[in-house]
Image (cartoon, grey):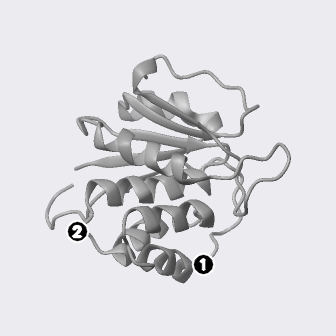
Amino acid sequence: MTVIIVAPLARIAEMAVKHGAREMISLTAREQAFHRPGVIQAHRHLLLNMNDISFKGTGSLIAPDETHVQEIIDFVRGWDQCAPLLVHCWMGVSRSPAAALIAALALAPEQEDGALVRRLRAASPYATPNSRLVQIGDDMLGRGGRLVDSVRAIGRGADADGNAPFALNVEEPTAGTI
């Protein structure tokens, strides 16, 4: 089963080792310093600098844009899926869950948006996917507003302390599998 691990920055090394991740997407502010876990090779690490905002950036803030989403899509389409993909942002509740949804739909476009988003909510009561990333992903993947509507339907997640990584199955698990 293809799995995406979503984590806060503080837990990326632990999650990479625990789940055997070899590839990672980082969605962080430009000035956010961190070390790539040693189990993730540099050529399989996508670093996207953006702030967690849902409006066009002003001043030093960088808004998520179409280039970021296209890079997510291209990166996951090159993922061998033999090991989980690790996706993180600062707290693991907004940018990274949105990127995980985009990645899942890029890999399995036949799935129903609502079912995917409900799996996200079941995996994390805290996830509140960044609305700008979701909107751009919906447009670029030709979802016709279904991803946006599905994310809106689950509402805002519970308050989080940035310490709750979770796993998202890219596709609905088949009955009887674990």
Residue 16 placement: quadrant: top left
Residue receiving disc 2: 110
Q: Residue furthest right?
A: 59
Q: Tally the marks.
A: 2
Residue 64 in view here: yes
> Relative to residue 98, is residue 8 drawn left or right?
right
In this rendering, the answer to whether 71 lies above or below 22 is below
**Percent position of residue 106, x then y:** 33, 56
**Residue at (61% x, 21% y) in the render:** 35
Is any atom of residue 169 visible in this view?
A: no
Between 135 and 40, which is closer to the camera in this rendering?
A: 135
Identified at 73% across, 32% down, the residue is 32
Residue found at x 69% / y 63%: 54
Q: Residue furthest left?
A: 176
C-alpha gap between disc 1 and disc 2? 24 Å
Q: Is residue 24 above or below residue 73?
A: above
Please give the name of the residue rendered at 37% of the width and 72% of the height, measured from the top-left corner. Answer: 143
The amino acid beneath tag 1 is Gly
User: Which labelled disc corresponds to residue 155?
Assistant: 1
